[in-house]
């Protein structure tokens, strides 16, 4: 009975987050959508489309035996690599603000890096569950490191440092819970940490973002503009917010208000109380996914759920940290909330996989 109640509760929690996300996407984007596209519902319609497809994926995967994912780990990696390469193909890949991160076909856009995150989790979970003894050796780690390296190189070429870091963190996390030795953990962590400042130095715009984070008021009309406007939004929300749909920052003051910085609009409209409730909802969801992992029928299911929970958790933390000025600006959507069809579809698909692990747990108990 407990398994069934958890299944229903997680489903309702995710649906609640996505519905709230649609409301906030509309609120944050209605003015800019009307201004740029002549349709105040432009981003809302795209988000609803992503949620509908995501819901179908979530329901379908909740009934799809997750063990079958282990058999297609290499095809999933191949599909992800092909999609990541296609963003560089003229006519298929689309560029926005100097980055090639999307594929556009028949009027539908897809962000391959979102697919790569979950393909990486599935591959790592499958390989580590099948080769538990080998992960203690450097040779045994090479397949995971190789796949992660290919993904990271293709994503950083887009360029997208934030997603690259997310992929790297996810790989390290999966290896740690998969049984990697302390020696290898230190061996891989040090170069990964050293790569961060190197990547920042190599791109002038990243250095500008770093300086803007340190002192946004040094360039209030330049690199510091977005962070300053984000803080204005959060600060003006107070305890209870200015009211739903009453944001002032959405009137073209805050760039990417409907996507990467939607948490600022949430803070402005619902206040600190609304932000705390939203963060609590994410914390509860992650807690429930970790519980599924701890009670999974097998090692593969445990690694799958733990990896998906980690992706949701790390992306939520990084997004909120950026919006609040706690870390330098970087572009990562808030799971289930930010505008982005591919993102919401993949996160809901990930929840579907976790729900199937939960269903298998129920079968084992019976």
Image (cartoon, rainbow, N blue to C red):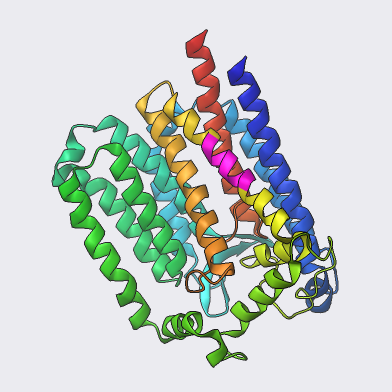
Quadrant of the drawing holding the N terminus: top right
Number of marks present in the image shown: 0
> Farthest residue toward the top?
366
Q: Residue at x 60, y 54 (%)?
A: 342
Q: Position of residue 28 (x, y in %)?
A: 76, 66
Residue 263 placement, left or right of 351:
right
Residue at image location 57% in from the left, 38% down from the top: 351
Confirm whether the magenta stretch covers residue 269: no
Seen from the viewer's position, the closer of residues 362 and 276 is: 276
110 above or below 325? above
Residue 87, how many percent across, how many down? Answer: 50, 66
Tell me which corner region of the image, top left, top right, bottom left or bottom right, holds residue 132. Answer: top left
Q: Is residue 92 visible?
A: no
Measured from the top left, where is residue 234 in percent x and y?
68, 69
Query: Which x, y percent locates residue 32?
Result: 78, 75
Q: Quadrant of residue 95?
A: bottom right
**184 or 304, which lies in front?**
184
Q: Is residue 279 above or below residue 309?
A: below
Q: Is residue 328 left or right of residue 34?
A: left
For residue 349, above or below residue 215: above
Indicate yes or no whether the magenta region holds residue 282.
Answer: yes
**Identity of the residue drawn at 60% across and 18% down:** 2
Q: Is residue 41 left or right of residue 226?
A: right
Q: Nearer the viewer, residue 80 or 320?
A: 320
In depth, the one of 347 and 70 nearer the eye is 347
Tell whether 291 sits left or right of 36: left
Residue at (67% x, 30% y) in the render:
9
- Write the start and end of the magenta stretch as one range: 280-287
- Residue 114 appears in the rendering: yes
Chief SS of the magenta region: helix
């Amino acid at each position: 009975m407990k398994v069934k109640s958890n299944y229903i509760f997680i489903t309702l929690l995710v649906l609640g987050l996505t519905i709230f996300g649609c409301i906030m996407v509309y609120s944050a984007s209605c003015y800019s959508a009307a201004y740029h596209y002549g349709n105040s519902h432009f981003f809302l319609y795209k988000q609803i489309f992503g949620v509908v497809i995501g819901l179908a994926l979530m329901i379908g995967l909740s009934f799809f035996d997750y063990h079958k994912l282990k058999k297609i780990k290499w095809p999933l990696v191949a599909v992800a690599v092909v999609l990541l390469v296609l963003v560089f193909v003229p006519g298929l890949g689309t560029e926005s603000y100097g980055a090639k991160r999307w594929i556009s076909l028949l009027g539908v856009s897809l962000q391959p890096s979102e697919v790569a995150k979950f393909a990486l989790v599935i591959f790592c979970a499958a390989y580590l569950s099948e080769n538990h003894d080998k992960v203690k050796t450097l040779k045994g780690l090479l397949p995971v490191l190789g796949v992660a390296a290919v993904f990271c190189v293709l994503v950083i070429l887009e360029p997208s440092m934030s997603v690259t870091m997310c992929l790297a963190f996810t790989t390290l996390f999966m290896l740690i819970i998969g049984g990697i030795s302390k020696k290898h953990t230190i061996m891989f962590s040090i170069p990964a940490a050293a790569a961060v400042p190197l990547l920042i130095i190599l791109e002038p715009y990243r250095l500008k973002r770093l300086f803007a984070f340190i002192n946004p008021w040094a360039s209030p009309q330049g690199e510091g503009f977005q962070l300053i406007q984000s803080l204005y939004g959060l600060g003006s929300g107070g305890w209870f917010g200015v009211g739903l749909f009453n944001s002032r920052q959405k009137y073209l003051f805050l760039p990417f208000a409907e996507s990467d910085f939607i948490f600022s609009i949430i803070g402005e409209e619902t206040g600190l109380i609304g932000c705390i409730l939203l963060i609590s909802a994410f914390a509860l969801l992650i807690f429930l996914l970790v519980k599924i992992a701890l009670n999974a029928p097998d090692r593969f299911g445990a690694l799958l759920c733990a990896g998906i929970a980690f992706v949701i958790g790390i992306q939520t933390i990084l997004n909120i940290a950026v919006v609040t000025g706690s870390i330098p600006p970087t572009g990562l959507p808030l799971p289930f909330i930010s505008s982005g069809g591919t993102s919401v579809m993949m996160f809901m698909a990930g929840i579907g996989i976790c729900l199937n692990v939960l269903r298998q747990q129920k079968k084992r108990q019976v």
